[in-house]
Image: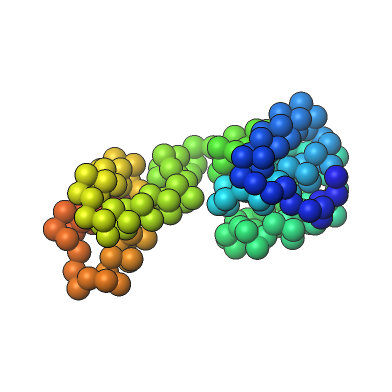
Amino acid sequence: MSLFADTVHGSNESRATFRQLSRQVFQDRSNVALHQSRLHVALSLPGTEPTQGALVDMFAGCSQATDTDREMALDFVQARLNPLLVAKLRPYITQAGLPLSNALATRWSVIASPSLDMPRRTMRCNSDDSRFHAQNAVKAWQDHDVTKQEAFLEHCVICQDKLAFLLARRSLLQQLDELPAAWKAVGDRLEMMVTES
């Protein structure tokens, strides 16, 4: 399958295909075509994490990938990824040897594994999850669902998910002059965590 073939449609079908390709990549790490196919399917999944995980696996575990293979793969998916991540991976196009344990691996990686030199929040929840939690929190606020709002605020404190809180806070402040008291208290608590760490 070419890296530039048509995308697989349907979330369930894409997830199943991604899982199948992940098993194949794990068993045949040096198969460039499998890595390319897996990257392609990752783009049909929501969020950035599947794409990042598949790309990091290719860079860390595919010994047969040439500089051209890595460059094409990065160029193919870079629009989906954070520009900082792209900048961190770009040097590894020509210098093979992204460590198997590294801070760029995600829970979708099957060859590479996340190292411990990453922010604590990232180990507890990824940015895709943070965005999802923030969207649900804003909806809970709009629906006046106090229970879901409290669950969100508790999540932010326990997981130190400052990203989710900041995203939800920004949406609320576009509609309000100031945050509700419970939200303000959590915001103050998260700020204290930043100064303590």
Task: Work out whether residue 139 or residue 79 is closer to the camera in this orientation and state it.
Answer: 139
At 69% from the left and 49% from the top, the residue drawn is 9
Q: Position of residue 50 (x, y in %)?
A: 61, 45
At 26% from the left and 46% from the top, the residue drawn is 148
Q: Where is residue 30 in the image (x, y as percent from the top left)?
A: 82, 35
When asked about the image quadrant of residue 99, the answer is top right
Task: Work out whether residue 186 or residue 179 is closer to the camera in this orientation and state it.
Answer: 179
For the rendered model, the colour scheme is rainbow
Q: Please, is residue 34 above or below residue 177 in the view?
A: above
Q: How many labels does the image show?
A: 0
Q: Position of residue 18 (x, y in %)?
A: 68, 38
Can residue 98 be seen by looking at this rendering? no
Can residue 92 be seen by looking at this rendering? yes
Most extreme residue toward the top is 27
At 14% from the left and 58% from the top, the residue drawn is 181
At 49% from the left and 37% from the top, the residue drawn is 116
Going by the image, does 141 lie left or right of 27? Answer: left
Going by the image, does 18 lie left or right of 96? Answer: left
Going by the image, does 192 lie left or right of 110? Answer: left
- Placement of the N terminus among the 4 image quadrants: top right
Q: Where is residue 137 in the image (x, y as percent from the top left)?
A: 31, 53
